[in-house]
Image (tube, helix red, strand yellow):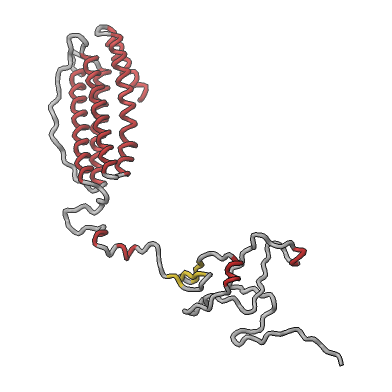
């Protein structure tokens, strides 16, 4: 009697049709194995991956609201699947098949807190103000006053050297431009104050000198040394303003001071220091006239 051995056949699944021994679920992401077998063993290319499964891999259906049972633990470990994948607005964990409802950033939920009321309703409050401390606002107003005072002094120097009995047109032109530059700095600070939501308060300006003649140094050297002192004092005030910004953790204000003022202030100090050195060398006589002509030529060359 001949006995025929038939291969063992598993009964068909009630919930799914018969599947071939090797089956790839099209809805399941397939990732190449880090150490694939050579093609001579598998009969396929190295970047092809076949999954041997006894039933379809369970994943969340695109249309169903419930997740299927999770895949076997051995299969999850072998595939090294990514943590999550999204489908139709839902976040699905591939390892567990459950829906993750947590969201990292929920702006409307955060705006419900009273401490995060970003848009004030009072008519006297600024709508643009944010993270702008009262100390920063007051320090900006002080620096506006410093710039206006420096401009006032330079304007008085311009008026002195423009007199008919002094007639040093180069110095007059230099101090007039310096006065306009300092006034421009004050206006820039005023615009910044309004941009951050502060209120500009103009403080009193001290009346400057009107006579700059000096019995030993002469008027040109005396005025230029005074200008150097003003630039250094203004630089110290700017550094103090920068410290206020750092103390208040105002990175944008600190960047504004560094970008718009500090570098320019160092250049101005260097330039006027050289003028003082040159005037000390030429003395009070004929050399002052040549220095004045040099300032005129520099202005003409720049134009």
Q: Which residue is at the far front?
A: 1
Q: Quadrant of residue 259?
A: top left
Residue that appears at 31% across and 25% down: 268
Q: Which residue is at the far bottom?
A: 1
41 or 195, which is in the foreground? 41
Q: Is residue 184 visible?
A: no
Q: Is residue 217 visible?
A: yes
Residue that appears at 58% across and 69% down: 76
Q: Quadrant of residue 20?
A: bottom right
Note whether 173 is above or below 45 in the view shown: above
Q: Tell me residue 204's x, y (percent).
A: 13, 34
Question: In this rendering, would 168 be left or right of 264?
Answer: left
Count of marks overlaid on the render: 0
Q: Tell me residue 45's x, y (percent).
A: 72, 63
Q: Tell me residue 288's x, y (percent).
A: 27, 11
Note whether 5 is above or below 300 in the view shown: below
Note whether 111 is above or below 194 in the view shown: below
Q: Quadrant of residue 5?
A: bottom right
Question: In this rendering, would 66 be left or right of 76?
Answer: left
């Amino acid at each position: 009697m001949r006995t025929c051995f038939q291969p063992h056949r598993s009964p068909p699944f009630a919930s799914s049709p018969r599947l071939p021994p090797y089956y790839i679920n099209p809805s399941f992401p397939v990732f190449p194995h880090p150490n694939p077998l050579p093609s001579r063993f598998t009969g396929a290319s190295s970047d092809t991956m076949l999954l041997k499964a006894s039933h379809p891999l369970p994943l969340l259906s695109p249309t169903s609201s419930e997740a299927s049972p999770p895949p076997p633990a051995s299969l999850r470990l072998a595939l090294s699947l990514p943590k999550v994948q999204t489908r139709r607005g839902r976040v699905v964990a591939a390892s567990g098949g459950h829906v993750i409802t947590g969201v990292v950033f929920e702006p409307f939920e955060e705006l419900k807190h009273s401490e995060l009321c970003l848009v004030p309703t009072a008519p006297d409050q600024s709508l643009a103000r944010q993270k702008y401390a009262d100390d920063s606002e007051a320090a900006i107003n002080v620096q506006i006053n410093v710039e206006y005072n420096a401009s006032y002094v330079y304007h008085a120097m311009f008026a002195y050297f423009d007199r008919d009995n002094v007639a040093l047109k180069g110095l007059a032109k230099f101090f007039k431009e310096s006065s306009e530059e300092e006034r421009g700095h004050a206006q820039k600070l005023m615009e910044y104050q309004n941009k951050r939501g502060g209120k500009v308060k103009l403080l009193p300006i001290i009346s400057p000198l009107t006579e700059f003649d000096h019995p030993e140094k002469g008027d040109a050297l005396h005025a230029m040394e005074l200008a150097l002192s003003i630039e250094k004092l203004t630089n110290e005030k700017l550094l103090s303003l920068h410290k206020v910004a750092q103390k208040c953790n105002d990175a944008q204000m600190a960047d504004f001071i560094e970008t718009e003022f500090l570098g320019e202030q160092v250049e101005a100090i260097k330039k006027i220091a050289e003028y003082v050195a040159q005037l000390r060398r030429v003395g009070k006589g004929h050399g002052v006239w040549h220095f004045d002509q040099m300032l005129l030529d520099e202005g003409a060359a720049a134009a």
